[in-house]
Structure formats: C-alpha cells, structure tokens
Amino acid sequence: MCPKNASYYGNRAATLMMLGRFQEALGDAQQSVRLDDSFVRGHLREGKCHLSLGNAMAACRSFQRALDLDHKNTQAQQEFKNAHAVIEYEKIAETDFEKRDFRKVVFCMDRALEFAPACHRFKILKAECLAMLGRYPEAQSVASDILRMDSTNADALYVRGLCLYYEDCIEKAVQFFVQALRMAPDHEKACVACRNAKALKAKKEDGNKAFKEGNYKLAYELYTEALGIDPNNIKTNAKLFCNRGTVNSKLRKLDAAIKDCTNAVKLDDTYIKAYLRRAQCYMDTEQYDEAVRDYEKVYQTEKTKEHKQLLKNAQLELKKSKRKDYYKILGVDKNASEDEIKKAYRKRALMHHPDRHSGASAEVQKEEEKKFKEVGEAFTILSDPKKKTRYDSGQDLDEEGMNMGDFDANNIFKAFFGGPGGFSFEASGPGNFFFQFG
C-alpha cells in the first residue's frame, strides 16, 4: 500500500530480526536506508543484521553512518565497539588456527558468536576446531544444526565428514567429503581430506591383508606408510601403531613393539588392545612391573575374567622374578632334566667351593662363599620334585617349613659327592686344582 515508506521496511526488518531471519531482515533494512538515507534506525538495523551474520566490516560502516547522523546515539556507539571486537576475535582466531591452537580459536569464536549468532562461518570454524580437539559430538552437533537450515552447505558437510574421519569411520567420511565437493568443487580442505581418507583406507587394508598372509615385513612397510599420511588422524594412527606393534612382536622385535604400543596409547589412552599388546611384550621381555601396570589399567577399564587372569599371571611372574632365580644360578634351562640339574650342580659347586679360593683375597672369598651357598640352595630346591613344583608355581617355600637361611651348603656338598673321609682341594700346579676324597 505504501511501497516508498522507509519506516515500514525498517519495522519489518525489526520483526524479521526478532524471528532470527537476519538475511531477510538485512534486505528490508537496506531498502529502508535506500529510501531514506537519514533514517538512523534503518542504518542501525542494517548494521545489526550485518553483525549477526558475521559481516563485521560492513556492520562498522552502517554504525558509523548512524553516528554521522546522530553522534550521541549510545546504541550506535556500543554496536560499533561490538563490531570492532568481532573483527579482533576474527584476527586472533586466524592467527591461532595457523598455530594449531584450536582451544583458543574455539574461545574466540564463542565470544564472536555472542555478537554474531547467525554467522555460519564462525560456527563452522568452531566446529572444525572442536573436531581437531577430538570433541566430535560437539562438532557434529554444530554442523548438523547448520545442515538443517542449509543442506547444501559444503563447509558443514566437510566438518561432518571430518568428525567421521577422525573417529575412524573412513568410508562414511568419504561420502560426506564427496558430497561437499559436489556442492563446492573447489573446496580445498574437503579435497585434501578426501584424498587422505582414501589413501589411509587403502594402506590400512593392504597392511591388514599382508599381515593375515604372514608377510610381516610388507605389513610393517604398509603400516609405516599409512602413519605418514595424516598425523592429525589420532584414532586411526593409534590403531596403525598398535597394528605395527603386533607386526614387530611377530618379528620378535619386542622393544620396537613396546614403543609402537606406547605411541598408540599416547594417542588414545582408552585403547585396550594396545595396552594388552604392550603388556604381553613386557611379559616376553620379563619387565613384569610394567606388565602388571598395563594389566591393572585394562582390568580397571574392563573387569572380565580373562583380564583378571592375565593380571594374576603377571603378578605371579613379578613375584617369582623378585626371588632368587635358581635356574640361573645353576645355569640350566627351566625344562632341565634331573641329570642336567645334577651335572650343573657338580660343575658350579666345585667352581665356587671355598677351599678352592682359600688363597684369594677376603673379598673374593666372601663372594665365592655366597655363590657356593646359593648353588646349594638351588640344588636343594630343583632336585626335589615337590619343592621344584612349588618353586615353579610361585608358592612360598617357607610354607613348607624350610628356612633357606638355616641349611648348610657343605652338608649338601658332602651328601652329593659322598665319601666317609671328607674332601679337600689340592693344587697340582699354579691355578690348577683337583678334587680328592679322604
């Protein structure tokens, strides 16, 4: 009825702003000031729409025009400051994004969105940084909100894909990247992410195939190549490190396997499989304290019978490792036969017998006497099937009523070698001894 009335366009702009329809409101506000350039509220509403949509520089120009018309207008003064604050937040966020300080970018975008609640660009940047920080549900929520309003938003599609990509749902991620590129063929980030996702998927699958076929060397190479594709993909890289650790364990490169599993849990401290793999490597290298720590972590997370048994086994091996290793003392394997144990005792007992070292220094004599006693202890336990079984199972030998500190190594020696008249070592030349029964 009155298409040339500036205030009507201004009023409708105000109504649309209340409804959150800032893009439509901007058109009406701009029409109002075209009809009447001295319409202060029109300039204020245009500036407010620009600011809400994240166009802070355009907002500054509108607020400045309002101040030119009414330099005492407090609303124009405050909104002008708000627009400049948004410009500053944008600058800081841009710098911090380059520095990969994603937490600070999220902070800046939250502050900017207080003044620009309808700015998709700020929301997308925040969502991308949340994804980079591993806060995937939050990032997806932001992207989904935008897609509900604009299903063709390439940036939002990219962020949805990015979240899936970082959660190791690579196949689904590729679908979103492809869709984003369909909407915006020159979307550089989506293009790079899509390429990385396809390469990662292919390398990982090839590595898995090589592993299953028993080609561990090739599997190692493929997993290593996959790890070089994208250092930002924490979850997938954690799995790749664990896979490579498994390959190293198959190749008996246990230290390398432990290192790979450690890298896996650094990336994902909830990765049970990596803790289990590392714990087994610790067991294989007799690092029982570390194995117990890993199995405890696993059992605290998943209280299964299997994990409980693994923890008990590690604790038992740790307990056994803190005792004297009688097999080591005799220099025999844990599966040594009775004859091998006797032969080893004969050799070690004669080697460390105090009489053989009577001419040595007091310090050497004391050390050899200690070794002689330990050899006697070892033989006493390992030559008795019952005691050997208890020892092998990690049970306390003192429960048998045997105090290992009270026995006489010389009596064991006499009993083993026999002879009613005792024994002595006699020299047959410098450094040469022979054993003689009396």
Image: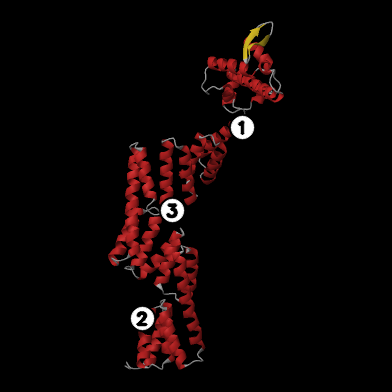
Residue sitting at x 57%, y 35%: 315
Q: Quadrant of the C terminus?
A: top right
Q: Relative to the observer, which residue lies in front, 366 or 275?
A: 366
Q: Earlier in the sequence, mark 2 or mark 1?
A: 2
Q: Earlier in the sequence, mark 3 or mark 1?
A: 3
Residue sitting at x 49%, y 64%: 103
Q: Tell me the distance, in whole angstroms, between the alpha carbons under discs 3 and 2.
A: 42 Å
Q: Tell me the distance, in whole angstroms, between the alpha carbons under discs 2 and 1.
A: 78 Å
Marker disc for residue 234 = 3
Marker disc for residue 89 = none
Q: Is residue 358 left or right of residue 342?
A: right
Query: Residue 60: x, y in percent?
Result: 44, 83
Of the two numbered discs 3 and 2 in the rendering, the one whose residue sits closer to the viewer: 3
Residue designated by label 2: 24
User: Contact, CB < 8 Å: mark 2 with mark 1?
Assistant: no
Mark 2 residue type = Glu
User: What is the secondary structure assignment of the residue under circle 1?
Assistant: loop
Reply above or below: 239 against 129.
Answer: above
User: What is the secondary structure assignment of the residue under circle 3?
Assistant: helix
Mark 1 residue type = Lys
Of the two numbered discs 2 and 1 in the rendering, the one whose residue sits closer to the viewer: 1
Reply above or below: 110 against 242.
Answer: below
Q: Tell me the distance, in whole angstroms, between the alpha carbons under discs 3 and 1.
A: 38 Å
Marker disc for residue 322 = 1
Mark 3 residue type = Ile
